[in-house]
Image (spheres, rainbow, N blue to C red):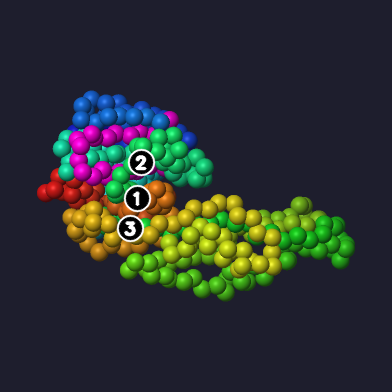
Amino acid sequence: MLDLTAPAVDITRTLCDIPSVSGNERALADAVVAALEPYAHLEVIRDGDLVVARTALGRAERVIIAGHLDTVPINDNLPTRDVVEDGEAYLWGRGTVDMKAGVAVQLKLAAELTEPVHDVTWVWYDHEEVEAAKNGLARLARNRPDLLEGSFAILGEPSNGGIEGGCNGTLRAVVRTRGIRSHSARSWRGENAIHFAAPILAKLAAHTAKTIDVEGLAYREGLNAVRISGGVAGNVIPDVCEVEINYRFAPDKTADDAVDRIRQFFDEYEVEITDLAGGARPGLDAPIAQSFARAVGGTPKPKYGWTDVARFSELGIPAVNYGPGDGQLAHADDERVRVSEIEDVERGLRGWLTGA
């Protein structure tokens, strides 16, 4: 049972101890629906393993507050446990950082805040940790775009309890070399496609990533080889080699700009774009975003990794990342979140939504 009257850290523990690796979110979605349905101030809607709960108070503005239910695969890091490091209390286990602590805060506030100063659409969605084609938030945008209408969006991705504006875009591509297959005992009769890939790797190794200022936030880019494959057998000269590269690009560029840059960078080679998601500008210039920033305090920072704030940006909705947890511990085997950050984010979000 998911008890939304419990402290947010206890809700986090319960959420994490219901495994929900991408593709297996149903049990957790069922628990979320069962926990929310008794609250009369919320309309609860389900789309697959995505859950929406929203108020209808006739407020002047509506905000969307979202988080994903899925995690990357478990690796002997469940069930959760309490740990103390240097006098600081943590909750340890898969999903504590990415991002069930943020979801726990959202669920608790969704249940408790019957009269928020803005109407709120709460969204908890599936399939965030896998390819974009399966993303639950994107599915909702296709199936029920009316449920994603709002003036501002907050995504509970781990941000150390501070605001991280926008996000970098991400592109994956395969850069391919071709040769001629032959028996390795007569290698002079062939052309080795793996050897032809050496200049690609040298060019990537020599590349210096840029840091680009966008609306006062410094976004650091990255261009790296992440996988290489080729070869047929131990006695065959390979005729194909593929280098997979990942380009993390600042939100001053569109997705098309990023594609053009990669094709120009590897203009001597065959390039296949395999995955592409545009970034999002910080979105902190909207008055409602500025009121949120004042309420929670701190200095906004850039988000280097891609998050679903980009989907809100595509819909014309300014969006920020705001959640407990250190993003550097996301997906780690020793994933753990400070209890104090869970409490701080709950306090900040509660204060803004109640006008305290």
- The magenta stretch spans which residues? 48-73
* Marks 1 & 2, CB-CB < 8 Å contact: yes
Tell me whether the residue at label 3 lies in contact with that at label 2, contact meaning CB atoms closer than 8 angstroms. no
Residue to which mark 3 is pinned:
283
- Image coordinates for residue 273, horizontal then vertical, percent: 60, 55
In the foreground, 216 or 36: 216
- What amino acid type should be assigned to the residue bearing mark 2? Leu
Decide which of tag 3 and tag 2 comes sooner along the chain: 2
> Pointer 2: what residue?
148
Q: Identify the element where label 2 is drawn.
A: helix
Q: Quadrant of the N terminus?
A: top left
On the image, the x and y values in percent for residue 120 come to: 25, 40
Q: Which residue is mark 1?
A: 317
Q: CA distance from mark 1 to mark 3?
A: 8 Å
Q: Which mark is residue 192?
A: none
Q: 10 Å neighbourhood of mark 1: few (<14), some, or many (≥20)?
A: many
- The kind of residue on which mark 1 rests is Ile
